[in-house]
Image (cartoon, helix red, strand yellow):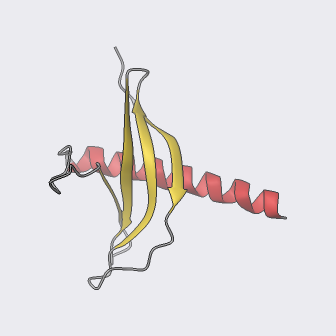
Amino acid sequence: MQLEPSIRSIWATGEDPSPKGFRRVAMFDMTFGDSVTVHDWRLILTPSGAYHAYAPDLKNGVHSADLAPAFRDHIAQLAVTALEIQNERSARRAA
């Protein structure tokens, strides 16, 4: 069974940066193969310009998953690419 991650849907949040300069730029749902879908991931832009992906928080505020940095970065890049594609499509429709 292959569990390759892919972005199912993504939506921009348009939020202002936090006092420390971190900004949630999007939320997204991710699938892992045909077997698993995880909703409400966050795509965060850091003050250094890097993007990080975070799994949803549980009700007690703890992350629902801990990810290796390389895997987290891979998911973040998938989300950035999906958001760029969505923005391009929206711009074409508006034109």
Which percent across, then down, holds residue 29? 44, 43
Is residue 22 found left or right of 67 in the rendered image? right
- Residue 24 in the image: above or below residue 11: below
Question: Which corner quadrant holds the N terminus?
Answer: top left
Q: Name which residue lies at 36% across and 19% down.
A: 2
Is residue 61 found left or right of 12 in the rendered image? left
Which percent across, then down, holds residue 49? 38, 73
Q: Name which residue lies at 36% across and 50% down.
A: 41
Whether residue 5 is visible to the viewer of this picture, yes or no, is: no
Towards the viewer: 65 or 49:
65
Kindly give the residue lying farthest to the bottom in the view shown: 19
Q: Name which residue lies at 45% across and 49% down.
A: 28
Q: How many discs appear?
A: 0
Q: Name which residue lies at 35% across and 25% down.
A: 3
Is residue 95 found left or right of 5 in the rendered image? right
Towards the viewer: 1 or 38:
38
Whether residue 3 is visible to the viewer of this picture, yes or no, is: yes
Kindly give the residue lying farthest to the right in the view shown: 95
Q: Quadrant of residue 88?
A: bottom right
- Residue 40 in the image: above or below residue 46: above
- Residue 88 in the image: above or below residue 75: below
Which percent across, then down, holds residue 7? 48, 41
Question: Which corner quadrant holds the C terminus?
Answer: bottom right
Which percent across, then down, holds residue 10? 52, 50
Is residue 70 found left or right of 32 in the rendered image? left
Kindly give the residue lying farthest to the front in the view shown: 59
